[in-house]
Image (spheres, coloured by chain):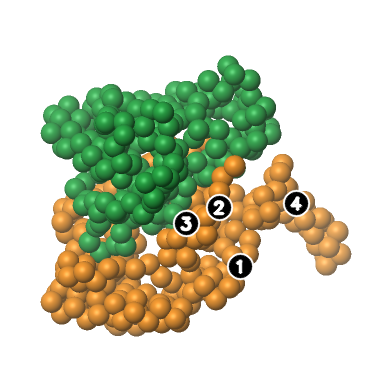
Chain colours: A green, B orange
Amino acid sequence: MKMLIKMVLLTLAALALPVAAQDAAPDALVKRVTLEVIDLIAKDKEIKAGSRAKLIQVIEAKVLPHFNFGAMTALAMGQSWNKANAEQKKQVTEEFKTLLVRTYASALAAYSEQKFDFRPLRAKPTDTDVTVNVRVLQPGTQAVTIDYSMEKTANGWKVYDVMVGGVSLVANYRTEFANTVRASGVDGLIRDLNKKNQEKK
Amino acid sequence: MRWCVRRLFLPLLLAALGGCATPEERDPRDPFEGMNRGIYRFNDTVDEYVAAPVARTYRKAIHAELRGRVGNFFANIQDIMIGANNFLQGKFEDGVNDWARFAFNSTFGLLGIHDVASEWGLEKHNEDFGQTFGRWGAPPGPYLILPFLGSSTVRDTAGTALDWSFAPLTEVRPIDLRNTLYGLYLVNTRADLLDASQLLQEAALDRYVFQRDAYLQRRRSLIYDGSPPREKLE
C-alpha cells in the first residue's frame, strides 16, 4: 500500500504536459512538457523557496492546456454525469480540476531528481486514442510507470486519464463520487469538493 | 453467572459488532467495511502519534543520501524472495535477473547499499507471495485492513504471512541486531512515504475509500506485471 501511495506521488509528479504544436505526436508532447516543467521548477527561486502559488501558476500555464477535465470528470462520475444539468457539470468539473491541480502541485513539490524513461509510442498514426508510457526511475525500487491516456481532439492531443503504477486516477475517484452522489446528489458532490478545496492553504 | 454472560454480554457483543458492520451501501469487494474502518482509524491514530512523528524526526536527522543507502540495503535483501516468487510464477528469466541483482549488489554494491545492478541494466522487480497466488488464479477475496499493516485482502494476508516467514531478516542473530534492523526498516520506509501520505490526505474526499480502491487497482496491476487486461471506463 505504501508503495502504491509513493507511486501515485511520483506519477503525479510526472504529469507535466506543456504548450506545444497541436499536431505534435502525443509521446513527443508528453516528453517535452514533462522536461519543460521539471526544468522550470528546478530553476525557479520562488518555487524552490516553497511558493505553492507560483507552482500552481506554472501548472496552470504549462500543464492544464493538455488535459481534458470535462472528459475526466465525466469518467469519474460515471452514470451520475448524465443526471447532472449543464450548470452542475460546469461546477463539478471546475471543483475537480482545482482538486487535481492542488494535488499535482504537492506531488511536484516532492519531486527530487528522479530520471524519466520516455517509452516510444506503440500506436498506428491513424489512432485517435493512445496510451503514452513514461517510467520514473529510482535506484533500489521498481520503476514507477505513468500511463497517460490521450485522445486526439480538434485542439491537439488531450489527456483524459493518468495511471500511476497501474492505478487510474479517474477510476479511483469513481467510488467516492458515486457514494457522495447517492447520499446527497450532484449538488452534494459539488459541495464536498468545494469544501475539500477550501481546506488550508 | 454464566447465565448472566449469555443473557447480557452476548447481546451486547452482537450489538457492537452489528453496529460497526452496517455501512449504508456495501461494496461487494469490501463486506467487512465496518470492521475495516475501525481498524483503519486505529492504524491512523498509531501513525499520527507514533510512526509519522518518528519518521519526520528521522528524515530531519538523517541525510537523504544515507536514507537512500538504507533503503537500498533492505531492497537488496528482498531481491532473494522476489526472485523466488518469479520462479514460482514461471518467469525464469526474471528470477535469474533478480538473483543476479542480489549477487552483484551484495558484492560490488557493498552489501546492497549501492544499486549497481540497476545501472547495469538489471531491473528491479516487485513480487511477493500474494502476487504469486494471484498469478496462480486465486481471487483476492474480501478487502481487509490489518492492524498496523494497513490494506490487504484475504489472499494478500496469506501472502504476507509467507513473505514474513521467508524474510531473510528474521534469521538475523543476535535478536537485538535483528530488532534494530526491523526498526530501521520500518522507520526508513515510513520516512520515504511522508510525502505520499500527505498527498493522499490532499487528494481524497474519503481517505478510506480512496486508499482501498487504489490498493485493489494496484495489486491487480502488479499481478499482471503492469499490463492487466484493460477495463474500459464508460
SS at mark 3 in the image: helix
User: Which of the two discs, 3 and 1, labels the residue nearer the N terminus?
Assistant: 1
- Marks 4 and 3 sit apart, C-alpha to C-alpha, by 31 Å
Q: Could you confirm whether marks 4 and 3 are on the same chain?
A: yes
Please tell me the numbered disc located at residue B218: 3
The front one of B10 and B97 is B97
Residue type at mark 1: give it: Pro
Q: Nearer the viewer, mark 4 or mark 3?
A: 3
Residue B226 is tagged as none
Gap in Å between the C-alphas at discs 4 and 2? 35 Å
Residue in front for this viewpoint, B84 or A32? A32
Q: What is the spatial separation of the Cα atoms under label 2 and label 1, in whole angstroms?
A: 17 Å
**Mark 2 to mark 3: distance in Å?**
13 Å
Q: CA distance from mark 3 to mark 1?
A: 15 Å
- The disc placed on residue B18 is 4
Of A164 and A86, nearer the camera is A86
Label 2: which secondary element: loop
For image coordinates 43% across by 75% down, the residue present is: B164
Residue A86 against residue B130 in the figure, above or below: above
Q: What amino acid does circle 3 point to? A: Arg
- Foreground of the two, B82 or B207: B82
As displayed, is residue A162 above or below residue B131?
above
Which chain hosts label 3? B
Judged from this view, the residue extending furthest toward the front is A126
Q: Chain of mark 2?
A: B
Tell me the residue that label 2 is attached to.
B231
